[in-house]
Image (cartoon, grey):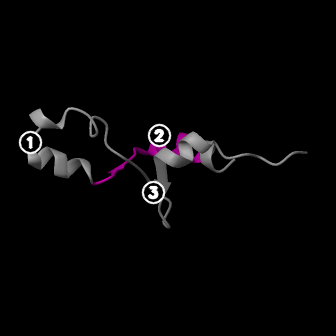
């Protein structure tokens, strides 16, 4: 049976921590920053933790 391959697009967009939490980047963070507040732009730098349902889906794509 062939090896299972990781979905590379998913691997680039999501990170799994040592404890198994899944994080993603913010949407709307790269374009049209001139009308966004500096506070909002700073908050986009911090990753967001996914919900448990989404976490299961992403782990299935990454770890198969």
Vertical position of residue 19 compared to residue 25: above or below: below
- Determine the secondary structure under disc 3: loop
Q: Which label was assigned to residue 25?
A: none
* Residue marked by disc 1: 37
Q: Comparing marks 3 and 1, which lies closer to the viewer? A: 1
Viewed as shown, does residue 47 lie left or right of 8? left
Taking the image as shown, residue 15 lies to the left or right of residue 60, namely: left
Asked if the residue under mark 3 is in contact with the one under mark 2, i.e. CB atoms within 8 Å, the reply is no
Q: Which mark is residue 21?
A: 3
Q: Which residue corresponds to the image point at 17% horizontal and 46% vertical from the top-left?
A: 41
* Farthest bottom residue in view: 18
Span shown in magenta: 46-59
Q: Residues within 10 Å of mark 1 (few under 14, many from 20)?
A: few
Left or right of 33, for residue 31: right
Depth-wise, is mark 1 or mark 2 nearer the camera?
Answer: 1
Q: Position of residue 56 (x, y in %)?
A: 54, 44
Residue 53 on the magenta span:
yes
In the structure shown, which secondary structural element does the residue marked by tag 1 occupy? loop
Camera-side residue of 13 and 55: 13
- The part of the image, by quadrant, that contains residue 35 is top left
Instruction: Pick the residue in front: 32 or 41.
Output: 32
Provide the residue designation for mark 2: 54
> In x, y percent, where is residue 49?
36, 50
6 part of magenta stretch: no
Spatial distance from mark 3 to mark 1, Cα to Cα?
29 Å
Inter-mark Cα distance, 2 to 3? 11 Å
Q: Earlier in the sequence, mark 2 or mark 3?
A: 3
Q: Are marks 1 and 2 in contact (CB under 8 Å)?
A: no
Instruction: State which tag comes first along the sequence, 3 or 1.
Output: 3
Q: Position of residue 5 (x, y in %)?
A: 73, 45
């Amino acid at each position: 049976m062939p090896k299972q391959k990781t979905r590379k697009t998913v691997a680039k967009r999501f990170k799994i921590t040592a404890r198994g939490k899944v994080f993603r980047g913010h949407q709307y963070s790269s374009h049209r920053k001139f009308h966004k507040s500096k506070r909002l732009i700073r908050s986009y730098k911090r990753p967001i933790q996914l919900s448990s349902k989404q976490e299961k889906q992403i782990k299935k794509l990454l770890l198969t």
